[in-house]
Image (cartoon, rainbow, N blue to C red):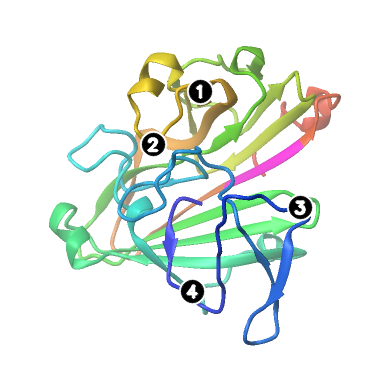
Amino acid sequence: MDFFTQKKSFKILRNPKPIHPPEITKDWNGIDQIVLRTPRGASARAIFKAPKAIRGGIPACFPQFGNCGSLEQHGFARNRMWTIDDNPPPLHANDSSGKSFIDLLLKSSEEDIKCWPHSFEFRLRVALSTDGDLSLISRVRNINGKPFSFSFAHHTYLLVSDISEIRIEGLETVDGVYLGSPNIIAVLDHERKRTFVIRKEGLPDVAVWNPWEKKSKAMVDFGDEEYKQMLCVDGAVIEKPVSLKPGEEWTGRLQLSVVPSSFCSDRLGLDRSGL
């Protein structure tokens, strides 16, 4: 994830040398925890220091996607300090049953209101199922006295074997925004014989992005050759921004699965919509 959370009975350690299998330790409550000694899912040159956005993971782009507005690129949410939400409003039972999850909360600060004069609560549940599916449930509530609108995306970085060998079911593997896209997207990695399946709700659009060679060399937090092994496929709200009246809430869901490429489109459910 591309956000920062306040420390709360967990510790992340980093060391240049990778270890296998994962190291298990216990916190002060005696709860087992995994110690991460190498950053994964990000560029080797990613900057892990606020307020710089981390080049990797799944940044939450809010309240603006891209640079189509007056705010910083992809909005400010991905560069803010999040807190752990101990008592979030309830979700559907399917959103937690059989899953390990954490609830995060971002509230508008005085700094945010100076650049975007609206009060909000942004809740994010990150859940991992026993079969390895990763789910992100975003809820944005208007606690302002007036309506506001926003665009949004889960800027999902995928690790692939070779960008030239990647195919996206129903889309083109080129930079672009696909409006009114299917709710199930399959990214086929032929060399690794695996498929990323992205299921989404409340996210009608998809953005596909790779920096390619020229832009990669101009990015200080991205390796010159790393574009060959990555692709961003974002579930997003771009064409028609979400509009919320005071007290209203929007929910967007994204689920990421990895399956063998031997699965056919019918088994993946590519002819159906929704989670």
Boundaries of the magenta span: 254-258
User: Quick one: label 2 or label 4, which is nearer the N terminus?
Assistant: 4
Q: What distance separates the C-alpha of mark 4 from that of mark 3?
A: 32 Å
Which label is found at residue 146? none
Give how far across and how far down residue 105 sits, in percent: 43, 67
**Residue extending farthest bottom:** 29
Q: Circle 4 sits on which residue?
A: 85
**Residue extending farthest right:** 262
Q: Secondary structure at mark 1?
A: helix
Which label is found at residue 227? 1
Which label is found at residue 20? 3
Q: What distance separates the C-alpha of mark 3 from that of mark 1?
A: 26 Å
Vertical side of 203 occupied by 146: above or below = below
Q: Is residue 103 magenta?
A: no
Between disc 4 and disc 3, the foreground one is 3
Q: Residue at x 43, y 71 (%)?
A: 6
Is the magenta region chiefly helix, strand or loop? Answer: strand
Q: Amino acid at mark 4?
A: Asp
Q: Secondary structure at mark 3?
A: loop
Q: Amino acid at mark 3?
A: His
Between disc 3 and disc 1, the foreground one is 3
Q: What distance separates the C-alpha of mark 2 from that of mark 4?
A: 31 Å
Vertical side of 156 occupied by 51: above or below = below
Give how far across and how far down residue 50 sits, in percent: 33, 56
Q: Secondary structure at mark 2?
A: loop
